[in-house]
Amino acid sequence: MKIILTLVLLGTVSNTFAAESSMETPLPSQTSVKVSSDIDDEITNARLRAVTGAKSNYSFWSQTVFLGSSLSAPLQTPRPQLNPQNGADPVNFSSQVGGKYRVSENDSLIAGIGLQYTPAYPDPRRGGQPTTTTMSQPYVDYSRAFRWGGYQNVVDVAISKYTLPADQDAGLNLFWSMSHQLIVELPSVKKLSLGFASFLGQDIYNTVRPKGSFYLGAGFDPVLEYALTEKLSFRTMYFMLSLSEISGEENLWKQSQQTESAGVGYAVTRDIYLYPNVGWMWGHMSADQTTVGLSANINL
């Protein structure tokens, strides 16, 4: 399925671009970029609408993720390690909350802070870790939502400040990132949409980077959605490419294990979107090696 999803996505994007290029229309800057007085005319995907936040000028914006344990024991603390090369991946509950100012129909500024709760867990490198609750990393995010031809896009540029003592002791100062989420509805297959989520981020240190520390990360993940009803949709994401640059090692770039998640998205309202899901590593599909999770976009 992962290979089919990737090939279908690439083929669809190529064919759509070819079809649009063959049409005798003015330059994209004149007609292909759809401009509307209502952002919902441009962004029709339920999840992307929730990602962009409420339509009022001032609003509360949040994005919450719960990383649970295994499908066979969802309430236990130990979590299957789908990417053991990246270190411990514990059960945790994290959220970014903030205030959003709507600059224009397409552009927004968000300022907020990160919250995280992590139950006690064993770390192979550092031993047992205690339960922690943190409020850290204040951030500022610029977001732009727009439609280009048939492609719905949300682009974010953000910067955050490291505030935890452990991070500051390691010399970490700031983290900047850019992300791009795209989705396109297939006219030939009703209710089916394809897209991707891409990411680029970099740590900024106060001092010389310690050996073995993370420095730069990048990712590209194909997405497939199928509308079940007006509010429900099946969604799967293939974590195809996730690279990180590690300081001071011979092999500077490391590729994370390719995994996949699937679940059902539910648009409670335009501004509230829930996505319960499971995640697994191809070749190790079993109930005790499949993780459970939940992501939620809540805007008020």
Image: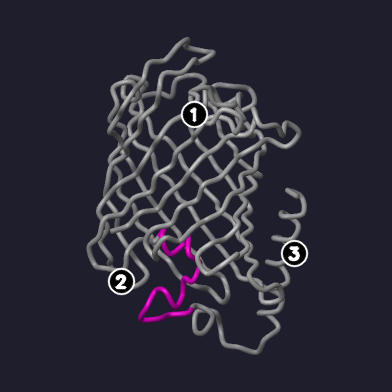
Label 2 or label 1, whichever lies nearer to me, is: 1
Q: Any mark on residue 212, and which?
A: none
Q: Any mark on residue 11, and which?
A: 3
Q: Is residue 200 above or below residue 257?
A: below
- Categorize mark 3 by other alpha carbons within 10 Å: few (<14), some (14-19), many (20+): few
Please provide percent x and percent y for residue 132. Answer: 34, 23
Where on the picture, by quarter, is residue 188?
bottom right
Which residue is found at the position 43% from the left and 24% from the top?
209
Is residue 40 covered in magenta? yes
How far apart are the alpha carbons under marks 2 and 1? Answer: 43 Å
Please give the residue where the numbered disc 2 appears in the rendered image.
Answer: 104
Mark closest to the chain's N terminus, 3 or 1: 3
Which residue is found at the position 66% from the left and 73% from the top?
190
Q: Which residues are magenta?
A: 34-51
How many numbered marks are there?
A: 3
Please provide percent x and percent y for residue 202. Answer: 45, 39
For this orientation, the residue located farthest to the top is 127
Q: Secondary structure at mark 2?
A: loop
Side of 199 relative to 253 (left or right)? left
Please give the residue where the numbered disc 1 appears in the rendered image.
Answer: 75
Which residue is found at the position 38% from the left and 37% from the top?
94
Q: Secondary structure at mark 1?
A: loop
Mark closest to the chain's N terminus, 2 or 1: 1
